[in-house]
């Protein structure tokens, strides 16, 4: 593992503290004993599928948050735009390109 890699437990701790939860409350939410939960945060144990699913469901967390640091997470707005662009026809892509040029360079595209 590279030095800059973040461990699962560190990400889980960040999510817990951001939500203002104690380890005990977090363990209760995802149906684990406090000892099992502490093992996750200290990276002594990795969660199985069911525990991961409980974390995602009970905390209503984006699964990406469990695997990426915030700075590495995909931007949801950008992902939505990318998805929409893939659905465009050639003509729509040309129009979209022209619109973006006008929006990003106002005054340079006087007609």
Image (tube, rainbow, N blue to C red):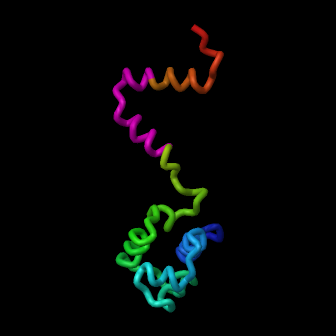
Quadrant in the picture for the N terminus: bottom right
Is 32 located above or below residue 86 in the figure? below
Task: Report if residue 1 is visible in the image.
Answer: no
Question: In the picture, residue 9 is in which quadrant?
Answer: bottom right
Q: Position of residue 68 (x, y in %)?
A: 53, 63
Q: Quadrant of residue 33?
A: bottom left
Q: Is residue 13 visible?
A: yes
Expressed as whole percent of the image width and height from the top left, the position of residue 54 reads 39, 75
In this rendered view, identify the residue nearer to me: 90 or 54: 54
Residue at 53% across, 56% down: 73
State the predominant SS element of the stretch in magenta.
Answer: helix
Camera-nearest residue between 77 and 45: 77
Bounds of the magenta segment? 78-95
Q: Is residue 10 above or below residue 45?
A: above
Which quadrant of the view contains residue 94? top left
In the shown orientation, is residue 29 left or right of residue 71? left
């Amino acid at each position: 593992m590279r030095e800059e890699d973040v461990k699962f437990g560190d990400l889980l701790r960040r999510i817990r503290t951001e939500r203002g939860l104690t380890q005990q409350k977090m363990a209760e939410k995802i149906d684990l004993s406090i000892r099992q939960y502490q093992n996750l945060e200290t990276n002594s144990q990795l969660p199985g599928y069911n525990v991961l699913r409980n974390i995602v469901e009970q905390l209503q967390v984006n699964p990406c948050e469990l695997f990426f640091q915030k700075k590495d997470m995909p931007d949801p707005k950008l992902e939505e735009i990318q998805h929409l662009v893939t659905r465009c026809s050639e003509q729509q892509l040309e129009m979209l390109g022209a619109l973006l040029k006008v929006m990003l360079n106002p005054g340079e595209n006087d007609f």
